[in-house]
Amino acid sequence: MPSPRRRGFPAVIPLVGMSFAGLACTDLSHLATGGPDASLGDAATPLPEEGGAIEGGVAPCGSNEKRCDGVCVSKDNPAYGCAADACTPCSVPYANDVTCRAGECGAATCQTGRADCNNRGMDGCEADLGTPATCGNCTTACPSNLVCVPGSGCLSGCPGTLVNCDGACVDLATSPSHCGTCSNACAGAPNAVPSCAASGCTLTCNSGYDQCDGDGTNGCEAKLPYYTDGDADGYGTTLAGSACTPPPGNAPNGGDCLDTNAKVYPGNKTFFATGYTMGATKTSYDYDCNGVEEEASQSHGTCASPCSYGYVPGTRTPGPGVSMYCGSVTAVSYCSSGSASGSAACSTSSSNALGCR
């Protein structure tokens, strides 16, 4: 057998299926060749033994959480709906505040003059406490010879300017069930309840909703959560509020693991040959914020028997999700028969830094 030739690194060499005296060497053709911070495509997937399981390229949420807008949120947060597969806010009619009830949206508190008498979450505070059937509370019904006066209960007649409409004493200027006249009931719309002002019908959006599209005839649209975006990369960290459109300095998506570096954000597809600093001293290559450092190439080399070509680990501090190969600039460049750790017949050389994300 001819004597082995020294091989440059990371040249493309046809080593698949070849060995030197039984010592297999791996193909170097897919090792990183780009310069610092070069994009190297999506060829690699994370090694489970280095970072643990991930779901769809992102770290999994807890058992009582779900992923919305790039962040893990509680399944019992009405701002993201209460169902396991929901992310839009709860829409509960006539509710001041909403809550989750066994995976369903419901009213926590009702608007003045309304009550949740049937204990059904999605129809909200369905009972009008100004009607004879539920006068002042869910259990009081006025006798047929009396009328319901809001705030006073069942009386013999309507006081002042209030008008008797089917046994309910109402103000025709503000009553959505009798707006302007006893026979005019205002219509509702999606995510909105009917209201009456100056004897004219209007709509009032449910809590968490607004006229986001500017069309008052098609109901109301969900106000979306927004997050403080310190590095203007379109992803934030801290939930700052909800609105139809995020105000300047905020983003509609969360999950940013470093909001002071615009190169670090969820879903980043670029591999980087240099890491970034987390905290005081820790260096990370997790540029896509999934909790796992993914290598652009997973060619791992060793001078131990059997010798193999590829990158050797660096000197970073090990930890969950850390790949010791990220940023490595050293690789096995020469193998020969009998190679073993410390043998002159197996050597390493400098290479382009291994990119990660």
Image: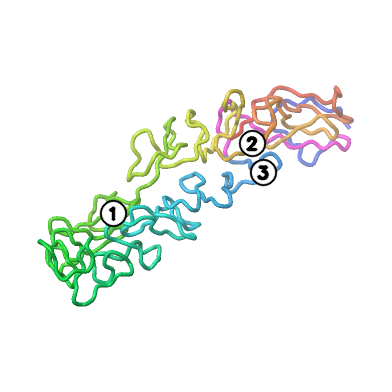
Q: Is residue 79 above or below residue 344?
A: below
Q: Secondary structure at mark 2?
A: loop
- Name which of mark 2 and mark 1 comes first in the sequence: 1
Contact, mark 2 vs mark 1 (Cβ under 8 Å): no
Marks 2 and 1, how far apart at CA:
49 Å
Identify the main secondary structure in magenta: loop
- Counting from the top left corner in percent of width and height, residue 287 is at 55, 34
Q: Secondary structure at mark 3?
A: loop
Circle 3 is placed at which residue position? Answer: 52
Circle 2 is placed at which residue position? Answer: 295
- Name which of mark 3 and mark 1 comes first in the sequence: 3
Q: Callout 2: 10 Å neighbours few (<14), some, many (20+)?
A: many
Circle 1 is placed at which residue position? Answer: 205
The image quarter containing residue 106 is bottom left
- Counting from the top left corner in percent of width and height, residue 180 is at 12, 63
Contact, mark 3 vs mark 1 (Cβ under 8 Å): no
Name the quarter where the N terminus is drawn.
top right
Question: Residue type at mark 1?
Answer: Cys
- Counting from the top left corner in percent of width and height, residue 89 is at 40, 53
Which of discs 3 and 1 lies nearer the camera? The answer is: 1
Q: Secondary structure at mark 1?
A: strand
Residue at the spot x=45%, y=60% of the render? 104
Q: Is residue 345 left or right of residue 291?
A: right
The image quarter containing residue 184 is bottom left
Question: Residue type at mark 2?
Answer: Glu
Question: Residue type at mark 3?
Answer: Gly
Q: Which residues are magenta?
A: 20-41
Q: Is residue 130 above or below residue 357?
A: below
Q: Residue furthest left?
A: 161
| Number of numbered labels in the structure image | 3
Q: Callout 1: 10 Å neighbours few (<14), some, many (20+)?
A: many
Contact, mark 3 vs mark 2 (Cβ under 8 Å): no
